[in-house]
Amino acid sequence: IKRTKVAEALKRTDFGATVNVKGWVRTHRSSKAVDFIALYDGSTINSIQIVIDPTAFDEALLKQITTGSCISVVGELVESQGSGQSVEILGKSIEIYGLCGSDYPMQKKGQTFEYMRQHAHLRLRTNSFGAIMRIRHNMAIAIHQYFHEHGFYYFHTPIITASDAEGAGEMFQVTTKNLYDLKKDEEGHITYNDDFFGKMTSLTVSGQLEGELGATALGQIYTFGPTFRAENSNTPRHLAEFWMIEPEVAFIDLNELMDLEEDFIKHCVRWALEHCKEDLEFLNKMVDKTLIERLEGVVKEDFVRLTYTEGIELLEKAVKEGHKFEFPVAWGMDLASEHERYLVEHHFKKPVIMCDYPKDIKAFYMKINEDGKTVQGTDVLFPQIGEIIGGSVREESYDKLVNEIETRGIPMKDMWWYLDTRKYGSCPHGGFGLGFERLILFVTGMQNIRDVIPFPRTPKSAEF
Ligand code: 4AD
Ligand code: MG
């Protein structure tokens, strides 16, 4: 008979029907009269209970079906006697696909996330990671759905690129050289003098610049792809490989851009509340008791909007009132995470969209305000997370952009294609980048970014 997924079986009411479920054993409890096997298959956070009369089976074999084993069960769908689920299966026959030894690292319940990280290849089988991965999937769908509905085109920007979009030099270099032939200099250091078919190329740090080419042709586009940063930050918020969503829109101004940022995030959070109910309830119980309440709050309330200068004033006021920061507060500084947290978690207690940053702490492409000192950059700051979005209106003036590129010492010869957007029919435009994993951190209530991506790449973890 055809396989029934656990999610579907749990919803059925045609008791007496014969079903076949396949999956992995979450727990197996046995007593003299009856065995209970909780079976999961990934289709839902819930396991289905298989009730077994041990006398009808080979008892030695039954004993071997321990946590982690993979089995196929044919049985009768019945109304559950116990509390919890309303459906269970009276097991009639069991086929064993794979037994699981007692050295199985995911055997014990309630392991710490740190422990699970050390077994990243198997942690996906836990309840928590099942929930997080299903939510991650649903967020990707929410994102595509939002942009598709709003007339954006999904636009694929290259992963191998010759441009440093953020001008921060945090790129992983791509080489065509065979790894085992890398040249070494006299001191034994590897020399990276080889390149990609005659060009210096890297893994992309952002699809924005190419995205601008798309937006100035198609009107509005978004990218959604892997992004690489060779920054040596070992924090719970940074990955060397993460996924970024970057919409880019022609004719948008700063206020409209902030509206888009807020509306988009709210859509994603609302989507999670509507489509990931069981998984969120599980995380709310196991990881963060205020999770659902916080998600509902974000959907309902207006985000705070303020300029960088107003933000600095609030921080200076806090210092005067005796609040201690590790880093001194002064106009012109880049906000440290303690400053962002103060504003978002202590002062406003909700998401903040900050704009009009000092030019010197932001990227070269941001539109310069009339004061000549600030740019139309906008960051969205979230409780618990800090910066979740970074974006800006782009400088559309060819001359001003060239001036920025030159004064910042960015190699002009790499920029000709980008400058052509300003040379031929330049238009006002802007966009932003949302760090996908930071969104997932917020939506799941998880604390460490390594725990919301299946295979985290950080300076200290990329074992396989
Ligand atoms: O602020 P960032 O560097 O902005 C850009 O890359 C722009 N080109 C975006 C644009 O305007 N199209 O990065 C955008 C977002 C950050 O707000 C953060 O959420 C995420 O990407 N991010 C990271 N996430 C995980 N690990 C890292 N190392 C990250 N660096 C940035
Ligand atoms: Mg940023």
Image (tube, rainbow, N blue to C red):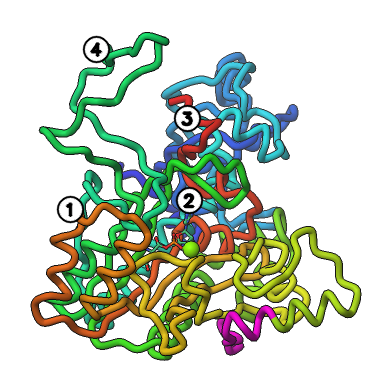
The residues bearing labels 1 and 4 have C-alpha atoms spaced at a distance of 30 Å
Q: Earlier in the sequence, mark 4 or mark 3?
A: 4
Q: Is mark 1 within 8 Å of ligand 1?
A: no
In this figure, which residue is indicated by the disc labeled 4? 181
Label 1: element kind: helix
The residues bearing labels 1 and 3 have C-alpha atoms spaced at a distance of 34 Å
300 magenta-colored: yes
The residues bearing labels 1 and 2 have C-alpha atoms spaced at a distance of 43 Å
Q: Which residues are magenta?
A: 299-312
Q: Amino acid at mark 3?
A: Ala
The residues bearing labels 4 and 3 have C-alpha atoms spaced at a distance of 22 Å
Q: Nearer the viewer, residue 281 or 17?
A: 281
The residues bearing labels 2 and 4 have C-alpha atoms spaced at a distance of 39 Å
Q: Is residue 396 left or right of residue 240?
A: left
Specify few, some or many for label 2: CA neighbours under 10 Å numbering under 14, 14-19, or 20 or more: many
Q: Earlier in the sequence, mark 1 or mark 4?
A: 4
Q: Is residue 193 left or right of residue 336?
A: left
Q: x%, y% of residue 448?
A: 62, 48
Q: Nearer the viewer, residue 323 or 372?
A: 372
Q: Residue at x 20, y 58 (%)?
A: 415
Q: Which mark is residue 395?
A: none
In this figure, which residue is indicated by the disc labeled 3? 462
Q: Residue at x 71, y 54 (%)?
A: 286
